[in-house]
Image (cartoon, rainbow, N blue to C red):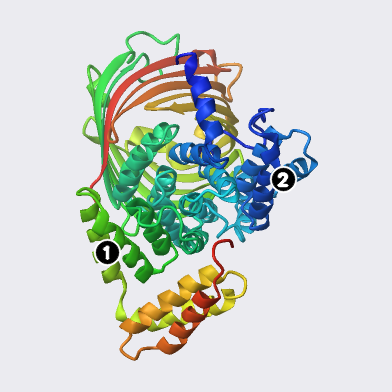
Amino acid sequence: MSPLRPAVLALLLAAAPPSESHLVAGADAFRAEAYEKALVEFRVAEALGSADASWYVAASLLKLGRAEDAVEAFVLAERSNRGGAGDALLEVYRGQACYAAQLLVCADRWFGSAEARAGPRLAPQLKALRSALRDALRPEQIEPAIDRFLDRAAALQRTRPALALAFAEEAAALATRSPERHRQDEATALAGRLVAAAPKGGR
Amino acid sequence: MTGLLLGLLVGAVDPCTAPIPPGEGDPREAQLYVQVGDAERAGGNVGAAREAYRAALARAPGSLEARRGFDAVCAPGADPVQAGADALENGDPEAALRALANARGRGNDHAVDLLEGIARYQLGQDTLAVPLLESARVDPGMAESASFFLGLIALRRGDGDRASRLFDQAGRAVGLEDAARQLARMAQQEGHLVVSALAELVYDTNVALRPDAAPTTLPGPDGSAGLTLQGLLRPWGTPGPYLRVEGQFSKQFTLSQLDLVGGAAALGFRLLGASGSLTGEYAYGYQALDGSGYLADQRVFLGGSLLTGMFLWGGAYAAHFEDYRPEALSDQSGVRQVLELDAGLLPGGGLRITGGYAGTWDAARVDPLSYLEHGPIVELVWAGGPWTFGVRGALAWRGYLAPDPNYADTTYATREDTRYLATTWIDVALGARWSVRGTVRFLRVSSNVPDLNATEWVFIGSVGWTGALL
């Protein structure tokens, strides 16, 4: 490295927002698969006002196997209406988080959104994944799943409204596929209340 | 083995013990890291909290809040996953299950699945262990370790083919190659129908155990070529019943009167638990020398082993109801009972050190040929990669019940022997089915009847093939 390089780098970092170095450190840790370290750095970047950090917090949580935390973090990142929305890779991560949390309609939605933007290598995989998801959603499982998700949403609506919203939306989406429209009004109303009550950003 | 897997799982760097580099980053940001640490800790996410407090301490080494938080999340038992891993390493799967009971939903659920799967496997709860290990196998970082234990379960169920495939997958993990390779071999022996063939060349310096002082006209050294074929049928795997059939052929190079043809069939049942096994068997064997009937042997066998921590306890008992067919040998017929008790130490590194005591009570038709024999045994076996090396030594004191009329004119008419036995072998596996072995055996008989002192060396080279057909 040239002797000038550290000085130039220091100048660039000095000019960048304070969250930038944490975002870079988080990205480095994420690439090195040190997801706990990445999560901490992205959390600090988030606290320092980074526009993108919330999305990467969610991705790190997914990598740590904290599926429901990741779903919640994606909802919060989306609400903050900043940064990475529309990024195909983040949408794949979001779909994976939904899938890991057994929110299959949610997973299909985000894999579908990513598929529309994905390149020639990723798109066929996403298509196959969505096909498998549709097969996994058997009719006889829909009503018990709606009941389960509505129970979770009701239990979480005060303490973790963003996660409760994800469950309520899943229940509402499943209800449209139920021949009896099982608890559809209830699910839609709960999701609507949670959207209306949602603060912008924060947890 | 579990320790090795846990080492792979937990990773090389422990944030609680790794040195914290001081003066890294902006000290003003330490408080932010503490806040992140507190939030993660409150959510039960100990791993992330550790990283956060470490980062805070790197920026502000004197921060009491950071130190307090760091010490709390690094305290023993603070991390249920680590506590579960520690309990497993200490050989306490039930404590591991208790530690892991509330570990899910805090990150790294696949690690929890793996650890719980291992604990269930160790407790013999295979049905509960399989879905957990399958779940862990989805995670690329744990796929090899999970495959390893799924392979062990398949092996326990007698599904040698599946076990073999799983061990192949497990063998990709650094540190698991040796164990996986050995288990892949074992898997080939654990199918529902397993056949094996062993061809050997033998050189024996004293085929008939001729006394040292005997005239050289008596049979002395000779070589032979032998073939042993065996089939083992376990319709329901292990545990379960089994049927074993064996054929044995041996052709001497010069002493054709010792050419051997033999066969045996055994019916048994094997019980297998998480840390122990028990086998009961009845067998009938028949041997002919040089085309004439020599020995018919009915055998009842009971043997088992129990693993507790680093120790493997073993016991085996056999009663042979022997019927020597030649009239000249008929007095040797009778019941021969053998009992061996041993304890093995498994210090790791593929080493097993066994010490034990063995006794034989041979009640022949006549007292001068009946004897009681007993003495210590010691064995050391090391297995690493495709190699297995073993050495076994035994000392046996044999006292006959009555004076032998053949030696009535000697001072010590009642024969008393001391037998020294030593065996060493080296075995190399050539893939999952083939193996080559070299064995050297030594026997020295030291008798109070000096004319019966004898020495024998046996050198054996063998090639074996074992494969599961079903």
The chain letter for the residue carrying disc 1 is: A
Considering every residue shown, the one lying at the far bottom of the view is A180
Q: Secondary structure at mark 2?
A: loop
Q: Secondary structure at mark 1?
A: helix
Along the viewing direction, whichever of B140 and B171 lies nearer the viewer: B140
Q: Could you tell whether A143 is left or right of B292 in the image?
A: right
Q: Nearer the viewer, mark 2 or mark 1?
A: 1
Residue beneath disc 1: A130
Left or right side of B13 for A3: left
Which amino acid, by three-letter code, is at mark 1?
Arg
- Residue under numbered circle 2: B76
Picture residue at 56% right of the left edge, 69% below the top:
A199
> Mark 2 and mark 1, same subunit?
no
Badge 2 vs badge 1, beta-carbon distance below 8 Å: no
Seen in the image, is B390 located left or right of residue A132? right
Find residue A63 and report its horizontal and vertical position in percent. Answer: 46, 50
Give how far apart the Cα atoms at labels 2 and 1 are.
44 Å
